[in-house]
């Protein structure tokens, strides 16, 4: 016999409500926190979250922030993040962030509470719909280009299988997926038997094709005189970080990365060289990279902002280990050759391969030149990023928001096990603040459930970007989180100023008085005073960085840093100068 939740008293229910099935599965694949905003079409669906042990509702101040938070959570967990929105108004507000997750191949699960089947069939003029005979699926259709799969649930039969299929797609393709749940289907019973078997989230692999491709890669590497490895961000998305690190040890070749792949390979590793970004690379790197006669690229993402405005020069025989296939000497494997399986196989083959020993060219590069402005008392772009990197600790999660931070931080060498997060390809400003909320929750999860050391979340954002999604700082306080937020106060959109219209009013912003921010977001007045810090020059910044309460935060810390409105990192000015067509 089943209880009110459809769960049998012997613990093995034959059915569960559809809503519960969905949450059980989402929890099983590693999600512990649900982001989103309630609405009258998802309330009963939200009720079922509380039925699942270990699953917690977080809630956000708007749906855009919820989707960004789910993205940040997913990146830190190296799994999926999840948000819930309501029909029309809610799902549409999340769409920009979902598009970002699609572009950057992040696993975000978007659950939409829809109008009832009857309302949909009769095209009723229900609130949040459009027009006189509204198509209630209009919003669903608008989101088609921004997801890798969707479950458009219209009946109980087959719904459980559809949920499983779509969750699997989220991992296999690494991207956002949607679940559209009509409000009248939330409580219909669906078979629960499948819940006893964990979902298989691994992509299907043709083992012979994986073996053949890996052997071909090893043969080509062995015949090269000066090979190198390039590790990019899709290695992370396809959950092959551990395997890639192992390969770096085994191949013992020089390793380069991109702006987005930074941090995957320990930057203090003996074989790590630097970011190779075509023209905007550190002095000496472009030349060193271009001397290699063969490059093995893992998880390439060659967008303009991730390739120095398309100025990378790769030898014609470059080997690409892509998400689902390998390209070698112009020959492409089938699509059943997943990245992780290939890197694993390469590790097996590497022990017996005879690969040319190549010295790390880093040791022959000139020292970083001293900055012209090193004696400046002001906080400058050429000073701050290296200083910040010295201050970082292993296991930190570091966000560089689109703006000068995203171009400045890549210049600095991070400690081991730093998780570097930027939205370098999609570049939607406002991303990093809510994503940092998601990340800090994910860090708590990892400590609680896996015993990982509690890393810190460092959010480095421009004042212009933070304005878009600043409300989520209130949520950080509410959730008792402890990120350290560095706000670059350079009086507006500096990155845009250096592209065009340096002093035009369109690059000015609405100025904030950050002194009151934490209190406005309901931090206790005396605590808020201790948690807000302002640096108008280097000496003040040094004092702040030395404080134990900032180094080892127990609550949200805000550090406002005053900088010049036209000062930019060299990587940004070089990238602008070398911009492709
Ligand atoms: N709107 C969105 C949603 N995303 C964008 N990328 C832009 C507009 C264009 N844009 C890119 S960077 C930027 C703008 C407006 C300014 C960022 O300024 P800020 O955060 O203050 O950083 P700074 O460059 O000053 O360090």
Image (cartoon, rainbow, N blue to C red):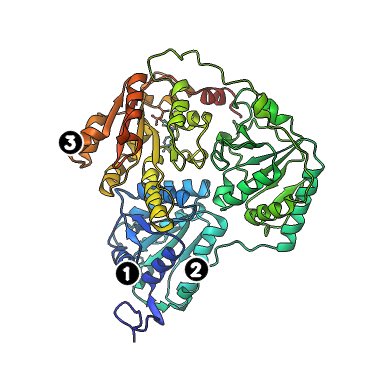
Task: Name which of mark 1 and mark 3 comes first in the sequence.
Answer: 1
The disc at residue 164 is 2
Point out residue 348 in the picture as x, y percentages from the top left corner.
Answer: 71, 55
Q: Can residue 335 be seen in this view?
A: yes
Mark 1 falls on what kind of element? helix
Pointer 3 residue: 526
Question: In the image shown, does 20 or 499 lie closer to the viewer?
Answer: 20
**Vertical comparison of 443 with 536: above or below:** below
**Vertical comparison of 536 with 246: above or below:** above
For the point 35% across and 69% down, the residue is 122
Mark 2 falls on what kind of element? helix
Task: Name which of mark 1 and mark 2 comes first in the sequence.
Answer: 1
State how far apart marks 1 and 3 are (Cα): 38 Å
Q: Is residue 491 visible?
A: no
**Vertical comparison of 405 with 425: above or below:** above
Mark 3 or mark 2, which is nearer to you?
A: 3
Image quadrant of residue 316? Answer: top right
Image quadrant of residue 57? Answer: bottom left
Does the CB distance between marks 1 and 3 fall below 8 Å?
no
Q: Furthest residue to the bottom?
A: 1
Pointer 1 residue: 51
């Amino acid at each position: 016999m089943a209880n009110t939740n459809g769960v049998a008293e012997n613990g093995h229910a034959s059915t569960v409500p559809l809503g519960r099935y969905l949450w059980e599965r989402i929890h099983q694949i590693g999600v512990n926190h649900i982001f989103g905003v309630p609405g009258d079409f998802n309330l009963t669906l939200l009720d079922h979250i509380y039925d699942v042990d270990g699953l917690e509702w977080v809630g956000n101040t708007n749906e855009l922030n919820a989707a960004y938070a789910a993205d940040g959570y997913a990146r830190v967990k190296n799994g999926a993040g999840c948000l819930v929105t309501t029909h029309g108004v809610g799902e549409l507000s999340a769409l920009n962030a979902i598009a970002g997750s699609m572009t950057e191949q992040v696993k975000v699960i978007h659950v939409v509470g829809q109008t009832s089947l009857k309302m949909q069939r009769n095209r009723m003029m229900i609130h949040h719909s459009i027009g006189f005979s509204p198509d209630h699926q209009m919003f669903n259709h608008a989101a088609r280009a921004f997801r890798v799969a969707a479950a458009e649930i219209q009946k109980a039969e087959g719904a459980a299988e559809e949920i499983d299929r779509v969750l699997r797609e989220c991992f296999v393709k690494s991207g956002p997926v949607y679940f559209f749940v009509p409000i009248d289907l939330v409580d219909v019973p669906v078979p629960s038997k499948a819940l006893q078997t964990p979902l298989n989230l691994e992509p299907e692999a043709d083992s012979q094709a994986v073996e053949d491709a890996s052997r071909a890669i090893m043969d080509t590497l062995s015949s090269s005189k000066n090979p190198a490895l390039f590790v990019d961000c899709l290695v992370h998305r396809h959950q092959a970080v551990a395997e890639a690190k192992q390969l770096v040890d085994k191949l013992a070749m020089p390793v380069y990365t991109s702006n987005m792949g930074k941090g995957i390979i320990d930057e203090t590793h003996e074989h790590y060289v630097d970011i190779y970004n075509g023209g905007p690379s550190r002095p000496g790197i472009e030349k060193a990279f271009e001397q290699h006669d063969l490059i093995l690229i893992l998880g390439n993402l060659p967008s303009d902002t991730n390739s120095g405005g398309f100025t990378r020069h790769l030898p014609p025989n470059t080997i690409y280990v892509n998400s689902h296939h390998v390209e070698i000497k112009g020959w492409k494997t089938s699509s059943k050759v997943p990245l992780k399986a290939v890197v694993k196989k390469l590790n097996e083959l590497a022990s017996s391969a005879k690969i040319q020993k190549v010295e790390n060219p880093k040791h022959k590069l000139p020292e970083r030149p001293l900055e012209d402005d090193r004696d400046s008392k002001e906080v400058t772009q050429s000073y701050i990023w290296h200083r910040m990197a010295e201050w970082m600790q292993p296991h930190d999660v570091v966000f560089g928001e689109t703006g000068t931070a995203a171009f400045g931080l890549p210049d600095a060498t991070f400690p081991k096990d730093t998780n570097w997060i930027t939205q370098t390809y999609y570049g939607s400003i406002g991303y990093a603040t809510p994503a940092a909320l998601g990340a800090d929750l994910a860090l708590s999860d990892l400590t609680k459930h896996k015993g990982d050391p509690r890393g810190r979340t460092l959010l480095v954002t421009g004042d212009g970007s933070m304005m878009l999604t600043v409300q989520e700082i209130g949520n950080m306080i509410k959730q008792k989180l402890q990120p350290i937020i560095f706000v670059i106060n350079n009086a507006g959109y500096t990155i845009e100023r250096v592209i065009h219209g340096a002093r035009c009013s369109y690059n000015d912003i609405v100025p904030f008085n950050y002194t009151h921010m934490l209190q406005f977001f309901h931090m206790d007045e005396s605590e808020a005073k201790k948690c807000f810090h302002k640096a108008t020059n280097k000496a003040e910044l040094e004092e702040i960085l030395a404080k134990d309460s900032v180094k080892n935060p127990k609550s949200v810390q805000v550090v406002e840093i005053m900088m010049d409105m036209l000062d930019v990192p060299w990587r940004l000015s070089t990238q602008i100068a070398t911009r492709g067509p």
